Image: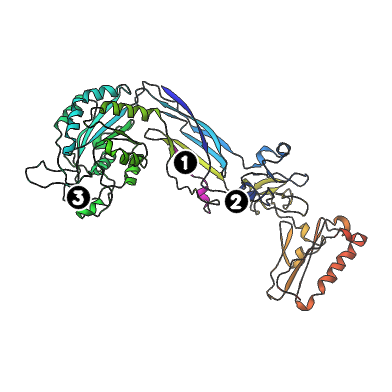
Amino acid sequence: MKSMLIAVCLVAVSCCLAADVPGCQHETCTKCIRHRTCIWCSQNNTETRWPSCISDKHPDLEKWLDWCDTEAVEPGMTYSVIKDEPLSDDDEVENIVQLSPQEVNLTVRIQEPYNFTLTYSHSANYPADVYYMMDGSQSMADDKDMLYSLGEQLAEGMKEITNNLYLGFGIFIDKPVLPYISTVPKVTPPYSFKNALPLTSNASAFTDEVKRAEGGTNQDFPEGGFDGLMQAIVCEKDIKWRNVSFRVIIFSTDAGFHFAGDGKLAGILRPNDKRCHLDANNEYNKAIVYDYPSVSQINEMAKLHRINLVFAITAEQEPLYARLSQHIEGATSGVLASDSSNVVDLLTSSLKDIISKVELTQRDHNSHVSALKCPDNEKDWNPVVEVYPVGRQGSLQINLAMHCQCSCAKPGLHCKRGGMHSGTAPPCAVYVSATRLPRQCECYSNDDDGTGTISEDSCRQTNTSAVCTDRGQCVCGQCQCKKPADPSQVTENVNVMNVGALVAGVGQHVLVTETMTNAKTQALNRDTQLITGLAGGLARHLTVSTNRHGTRS
């Protein structure tokens, strides 16, 4: 059993950063953590010099982390293994496990990589299903004879890779209708695709069926191999693909291929339905009903059914099929000799090359790689990502949780004594003073009843005065004035900061509001003088700010 450790670097690309903002001067936790280099501390920050939002490049970051409790740091990346079955041994033939672990939970911040390790193991006798599809046109007659003579050697050569080998054989020509094939009487009846031999462990049956296979003629140079290829992929029961096996289709031809749209030449307009249509004789019976499949449809079904494709083609077709292989996951191409005499070496070397390489990719999960912000729908913040080895059994399911919102911003959480508790108060409210960086919970009262109501002390002129002088609403320690009904009115907000004991019973923040028309432009000056008088000789400590809404002369 060969094992390899694979380091996986996963980046949450389903939601990306908004426009970059210099530094980490963000006023809310959510804004802070959406900046790629910023982190947030959600614990009480009223008695410290540390900012709540800080850069992960800050020179004093270690001291900041010592101050902030680990549980209070936002965002925190977490990784936990949910399912981790042991890897299978070489002699196991059922319920084979090649990838470990199988399921993990991962919480990451936006565009922040997270490294973890997974292990892939290839069992020496892992089941292999090899289905050989041959072009049945007359130009490939000598290749069919060579495949018959080398059939036993092919089976023996494959045993170098695994002892658990099944072989199958199919043959294709083109749609049995003009202008693709000849309808001249006494010619072998034309057909699109025949499943001549479903997968079997009997190598002699494979060579016998290759010998009996009848070819045919077609009129144009491209072949209808895509019709047969689609049937070989999707008809799992008819082809007898095993549930646990390494699935390979060998596609051998000396010509190009028809694809979606070419059916119009015969008036066939219905798109290929990607379904199995083999009749009782194991022949494709909807060739003149559905158009040829497209390259993207072949790729889609090959991924879904874990098919590894090997295009065994003549030298003149190599450039075409090399380009085609780039558009089909798990596909490769190799050049056949003119008489297919190198078919055994080509197939064994191709399969060894496929098995020796492990390509990890992910299935589609509706991610928005080009998004500039977190998705509006919160359901899109937790995608499930499936990582799997191409063309192989097994996968790793990553239950991804992206940090698009702080823990304190989740519904039903609010502040009490610097911590987050159940309740209905507005979450993650932040008050920003004139001299400090953002602080999270100081706008909530530290009462003991657990109600977590917003403190309104800073919105009262005195202990007994009305909140915001009945002309506004106290929001997180600041007054928001009511909008005047008359647009010509002007609302003046006067904030007096840090006056302390200058005004008896006022505390840290005093706010006086005055709503006036243009005829009352002097009222504000009188109110300001009143406040200055209350402060006595220390008026130099007053800070007055004015916000105007409307026009005034």
* Relative image position of residue 432 (x, y in whole percent): 73, 53
In the depicted structure, whether residue 157 falls above or below residue 402 = above
User: Residue at position x 79%, y 76% from top?
Assistant: 520
Outermost right residue: 537
* Relative image position of residue 523 (x, y in whole percent): 82, 73
User: Residue at position x 68%, y 75% from top?
Assistant: 487
User: Residue at position x 15%, y 30% from top?
Assistant: 211
Q: Give the range drawn in magenta.
A: 375-387
In screen coordinates, is 222 left or right of 113? Answer: left
Label pair 3/2, CB-CB below 8 angstroms = no
Name the residue carrying label 3.
288
User: What is the quadrant of the N terminus in the image?
Assistant: top left
In screen coordinates, is 271 left or right of 282? Answer: right
- Between circles 2 and 1, the one closer to the viewer is 1
What amino acid is at disc 3?
Ile
* Relative image position of residue 154 (x, y in whole percent): 25, 25
Name the residue carrying label 2.
411
The stretch drawn in magenta includes residue 378: yes
Outermost left residue: 186
Q: In the structure shown, which secondary structural element does the residue marked by tag 3 occupy?
A: loop
Name the residue carrying label 1.
385
